Image (cartoon, coloured by chain):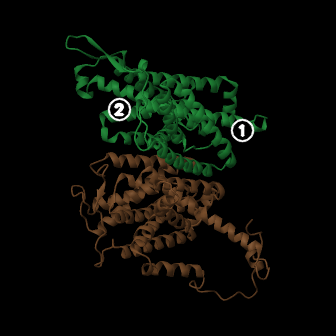
Amino acid sequence: MKAFVTRHPTWSLIIGFVVAVLLWLIFAPWTEGMEDVLGRKRVFLNAIFGGVTLGALYFLVASGFTLIFGLMRNVNLAHGSLYLLGGYIGFEVSERTGSWLLAFPVVFVVVALLGLVLQNQVFRRMEGEELRQTMVTIGLSVVLADIMLWIWGGQSYTIFAPDWLSGPMTLPIVSGYRSSGEAVMLKYPAVRMAILFAAIVVGVAMWLILNRSRLGMLIRAGVDDREMLAASGVRIQYVFLAVFGFGAGLAGMAGIVGGTFQSLSPGEDTRFLLASLVVVIVGGMGSIPGAAIGALVIGLAEQLGLVYAPTYSVVFTFLIMAAVLAFRPQGLLGRA
Amino acid sequence: MALAEPPLGRTTAPTRPAPQKVWVERIPPIWWVLGLFLLTLPAYANDFILFQVFGWTFILGMIALSLMFLAGYGGMVSLIQMSVAAMAGYMVAIFGTSGIAAISMDLPWWLYIPIAILIAAIFGTIVGALAVRTEGIYTIMITLAIAAAFFYFTRQNYTIFNGYTGFNLVVPPQLFGIDWRQPVPFYYLTLGWAAISYGVVIYVSRAPFGLALQGIRDNPRRMAALGFNVTAHRVAAYTFASVIAALAGILLVWQNAQIAPGTAGIPAVIDILVIAVIGGIGRPIGPFVGALIYVLLRTFSPDVLLTFGLSGERFKLLIGLGFLALVFFSPDGVLGLWDRWRARQARRGDPLTGEKGE
């Protein structure tokens, strides 16, 4: 961070200014004039929080995608199918056992096992043939999507959150004032805050594992130079298996999260595949912090766009991607 | 270096060269048979086969051909071609006549067709200019993302693209007193344009531009060192491919008589790649072979599945599994299978004389 500030003083100033303005908009009480221009503060706050929680969900999906890509150079276009499959399995588990929490480990194990099979039986056979791997993942996503349509049909499912997470919680942020002058605090669905919290925990844990553990060291070395790592005696296939299984399992768990605060239906797989693509393109391929920043930017752009320019919210996402491509093709945090 | 090498061709050539054949004689007989078959098809095929099977095959084949041109000669796998085609279709609906009178401008056909092709080509060029900044799998990802953005944009925009419903009643003009949407005229229309596109792609691939493009595919740095503008060639390839895709898009909107965001949805975009890969992206005939297989599967697999007691809706599973198997065993598509079979036959030699083939 320090190195970034010394290298790009203007950019860090601009970024710092934007962040400061956003924080001030969130925490400061709004005046009458501001409400005239920007609308109700409650609406703005809801858009911001919606964007951040959506970004958290995108991060959960995209971090596995970017990790797999960074290590194995494999664009897994079946990632969205893993997400949707995880959501459906999570729905079945939570319906049958009545436990929302139990769904997470079950889905993680099942989808991670599927990921292991894919890596060991499919991708290992065509190592280095990137285009062919991509084609295979496309074929897999078509097959998986149709099998899921076969089993679960075309209707949409919602996974119900447990009682202790339902209902709103009060945040220490002023959203407006009553006529009596009394401050009204922002109320926000508790389950979304839990998702945000979980995403932050997952992100920090991934960062710690990548930067502080032996496995993380192996993964980072593999990202830098796969052949050299293999030549120095590391059984790189096991590292690949671990990363692919973990990334797939994470996508599956994200499916439960997505099924809880949105819904599961055919077509969601491509939506989330696409979201991960855009997030990873914006953030930089193979970078976990990049995925976090990209997810945050895309989530915020989507939600703020939905509130302030409903017709063109998709275009904002696209414009951000095009701008990043035009000025920094390797992504915000990607390495050239 | 090239000067020092012995000219290979001359050492093996006979001392007295055979008389030069006229270009008509050099066309292999199989092409004459195929051409005759396609031209006389209306005599013994019903309207459904002509309009739905072959008309659709030629259209999808042209879109896949534009992908094949980019992927096979340029080394750029672009998933944007379906969106470019849909863009041309939308422009035909917007500038021409459609059931949505509030948006359509009712221009004459000689104006709206060039406009549609021009706008689609500009669209494809802009996307190409963005996409050539990346390489390999990145190009797939970026073009896929842009194609999705196009889909969502057309679905949400009501002022230009009429949102979710799109345009209906888009029909070809009554030219020379013929209703071009009747099966037989439409069959010849699509056949003609498919043949023209095929010929132009063959021509361009042997023209200096196409040769330079193939050189860039094989070694961009060397071509840059030789003084070729790598980026300009790649972007121009996108423009050329966009024109073919745009022609196909216009035919597609005429065939369906309507266009909606789903025309260029993600499944449709993926289908074009599947078609090109099934046929084989090494040669321009591949996309048409792939399109024929795809259309036949799509049209008749429900019946086949039903006879085996399965639900007719599972044709996607069939296509997906077929695609997977093909990518697994023959990365260069059906044509690759055919080539290998031919090579094995040639190795085995003639069954009668036992002579080895070439």
Point out residue B107 in the picture as x, y percentages from the top left corner.
25, 65
Using the image as rendered, state which of residue B297 and residue B92 is in the foreground: B297
Using the image as rendered, state which of residue A54 and residue B219 is in the foreground: A54
Earlier along the polypeptide chain: callout 2 or callout 1? 1
Point out residue A118 in the picture as x, y percentages from the top left corner.
63, 42
Quarter where residue A172 is shown: top left
Quarter where residue A37 is shown: top left
| Residue under label 1 | A237
Q: Residue at x 43, y 63 (%)?
A: B243
Q: Quadrant of the C terminus of chain A?
A: top right
Q: Which-is-in-front pick, marks 2 and 1?
A: 1
Q: Are marks 2 and 1 on the same chain?
A: yes
Circle 1 residues within 10 Å: few <14, some 14–19, many ≥20 = few
Quarter where residue A187 is shown: top left
| Left or right of residue B344, residue B123 in this image | left
Q: Secondary structure at mark 1?
A: helix
Point out residue A284 in the picture as x, y percentages from the top left corner.
54, 37
Q: Chain of mark 1?
A: A
Q: Quadrant of the N terminus of chain A?
A: top right
Point out residue B113 in the picture as x, y percentages from the top left corner.
33, 66
Q: Is residue B193 above or below residue B103?
A: below
Q: Is residue A49 above or below residue A230?
A: above
Q: Residue at x 45, y 70 (%)?
A: B54
Q: Is residue B219 above or below residue A190?
A: below
Hey, what amino acid is under mark 1?
A: Gln
The numbered dot on residue B168 is: none
Chain B drawn in what color? brown
Q: Are marks 2 and 1 in contact (CB under 8 Å)?
A: no
| Left or right of residue A218, residue A25 in this image | left
Hey, what amino acid is under mark 2?
A: Leu
Q: Secondary structure at mark 2?
A: helix
Which chain appears green? A
